[in-house]
Image: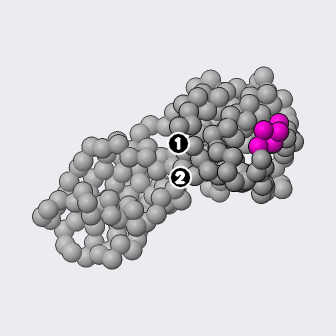
Amino acid sequence: MEFLEKWIEYDYNPWILFDSNGRVKTLNQEAQFLLAEVTVKEIFELAVAYANISYGFKTTMLDLSYGRYEFFGIMVGYEDNDTIAIRLYQKPPERISNPHIDDMGSHNIYNLIDLAVSTSSISRRHGFTTSFDPTFPEMKIHPEEFVRLMSEIFLCFRDTEPIEITMTLKTGETLKFEKRRYPIFQIAVKGDLDNSCNISSLSETAKKLNGYIVKKESRILFEAPLISI
């Protein structure tokens, strides 16, 4: 791999090259993660919409959000009718500057979710369904804050259908703080989402758990580092 290819491959900003039919010809590592949050079709249509009228390159400043990714601009370029490329300029992530670790105890995450579900089931007619990866170890987490966050998330869904809860480990992604990298676990809650839900309030609680909140269609995602030491 040549130096320029390495530069693109390891760039913090997603970069994708499409053919004229919207198929991906090549992309860098960051773009692979991005495409777990948004469809190829949507990014291709974005590139076409913001391309220069004639051949060349065009940079546009605009705010975009796909899952946990946020961007402040894009550059689109093409020199023929066969290929078109897009680079998305990523906003700096919200860093965990004061991680809460030392004052955390190790807890069984399944038991904490069950507690939040049991408490919230009292006032819900349609109940909950769950699907968990069964291999999670005990992890360092604030039990009271976690149960409170889950309960607040459940309140964001109307009582018209069961709330679906899934918990998985995100493959290939990590969070780094205090010079260590930790795998990321994700709890996805899906149902009849009330759009008036206060995501900012949920995010403040999530920060106390070293995590963050993502609102995505009919789901609310809580993602945080899995600290098992």
**Amino acid of disc 2:** Glu
Picture coordinates of residue 145 (x, y %)? 74, 28
Picture coordinates of residue 97 (x, y %)? 58, 26
Q: Which residues are magenta?
A: 119-124
* Left or right: 41 in relation to 112: left
Q: Residue at x 57, y 52 (%)?
A: 218
Q: Which mark is residue 217?
A: 2
**The one of 87 and 190 positioned closer to us in this rendering:** 190
Residue 141 appears in view:
no
Q: Residue at x 43, y 43 (%)?
A: 70
**Helix, strand or loop under label 1:** loop
Q: Is residue 29 magenta?
A: no
- Against 218, is 154 above or below? above
Picture coordinates of residue 223 (x, y %)? 64, 43
Q: Which mark is residue 195?
A: 1
Residue furthest left in the image: 54
The label nearer to you, 2 versus 1, is 1
